[in-house]
Image: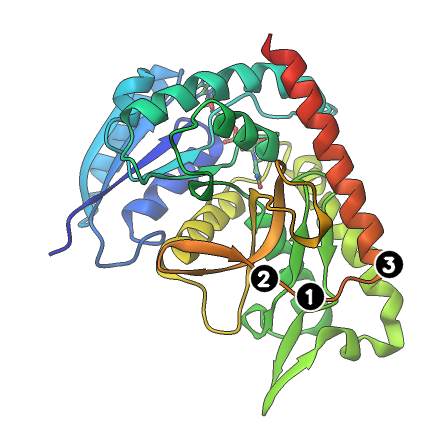
Amino acid sequence: EKEPVTVLVTGAAGQIGYALVPMIARGAMLGGDQPVIIHMLDVASESLNAVKMELIDSAFPLLRGVVATTDVSEACQGVNIAIMAGGIPRREGMERKDVMSKNVSIYKSQASALQQHAAPDCKVLVVANPANTNALILREFAPAISEKNITCLTRLDHNRALAQISEKLDIHVSEVKNVIIWGNHSSTQYPDASHATVKIERGEKRVAELFADDDKWLQTEFITTVQQRGAEIIKVRKQSSALSAASAVCDHIRDWVLGTPKGTWVSMGVYSDGSYGIPPGLMYSFPVTCKNGEWSIVEGLKIDAFSREKMDASARELIEEKVLANSCLY
Ligand code: NAX
């Protein structure tokens, strides 16, 4: 039998945490043959303990241990994978920027704890908003963790983009691939379908070709629907997305650890190396493929003027967030 993998979930008493921990314990993240130990951190100790009780009561065969704690060092001890969903979320009517300073201080201190106590090759996924900038803060205060091991979640946006195309074309979502979310996990993100394809009888067809009669849709409604989907869920549900976010977290880690299927890329927020003219030193969502536990940015895609402008706009917002975050630090 495989050695258990230790997965940390911060904010585990929150909505995403509650949806996520059973998925991890069922093998949706690391596979049905991979035992796991789940470490849960939250400041809400009573509801956190209740989650632990429910995990125990579920009698998950793959679950080899549960730690529920309000102590950051204990939570980070020996973790192989860290899902950082803890923080102060954005509520209806709140701007992302309002929540910046609270989250910056959380990510600064949790970065140090991870660097000190986690496994040296721990893979980190930041979910809590502002996700890209929280990840950047984490990177800055955990210099011992390789920058290749710090990412943020844009897979939910990626999945939403696949879903919109599948709904519009009335085909199954598994037949659509290679959309891209560029940039920030915010309303400036650029959902790009210009390289996306759908499966047809013998091979693949470009999504853009299928929309030849309605090519405006891909450049207008598709983009705004994906960008605004989070806000739409909040409006209808009175709470932000949780089950789809948890599922996207599992997709992100599974593909990172086990690899992306041949010919398929996914979107991940990663440290920019300057690819596609995006300033190095930003956490920016790119198309990536994963192999042997490492992601690499898909290079060489053609970028037209329409895309360029949108990609740069999101980069500009991330630079502004970075400046704002730095001003919150001292
Ligand atoms: P909740 O408010 O339900 O849960 C957050 C949890 O974090 C709470 O239980 C809270 O007690 C805990 N917490 C607060 N401070 C903490 C600290 N210092 N250490 C540990 N835990 C702490 O929010 P939820 O809906 O679960 O969302 C979690 C985060 O994900 C939010 O920041 C949210 O904005 C973000 N999201 C990011 C998404 C993405 O695609 N990147 C999509 C979904 C989600 O909106």
Q: Is residue 172 left or right of residue 50?
A: right
Q: Is residue 190 left or right of residue 270?
A: right
Amino acid type, label 1:
Leu
Secondary structure of the residue carrying tag 2 is loop
Which residue does the numbered mark 3 point to in the structure image? 305
Q: How many numbered marks does the figure carry? A: 3
The image shows residue 232, relative to residue 302, as above or below, that is above
Q: Amino acid at mark 3?
A: Ala
Label 3 Cα neighbours within 10 Å, binned few <14 / some 14-19 / many ≥20: few
Tell me the quadrant of the picture where the N terminus can be found. bottom left
Measured as percent of width and height from the top left, residue 327 is found at 67, 13
* Mark positioned earlier in the residue sequence (3 or 2): 2
* Secondary structure found at label 1: loop
Q: Which residue is mark 2?
A: 298
Give the image quarter of residue 189: top right
Mark 1 — residue? Answer: 301
In the rendered image of this protein, does residue 43 appear above or below residue 198? above
> Cβ–Cβ below 8 Å for labels 1 and 2?
yes
Label 1 – label 2 distance at C-alpha: 7 Å
Compared across the picture, whether 113 is left or right of 63 comes to right
Q: Position of residue 328 (x, y in %)?
A: 63, 12
Instruction: Please tell me which residue lies in front, 5 or 38.
Output: 5
Q: Is residue 162 visible?
A: yes
Graded by Cα atoms within 10 Å as few (under 14), some (14 to 19) or many (20 or more), the crowding at tag 2 reads some
CA–CA distance in space, label 1 to label 3: 13 Å
Q: Residue at x 64, y 40 (%)?
A: 280
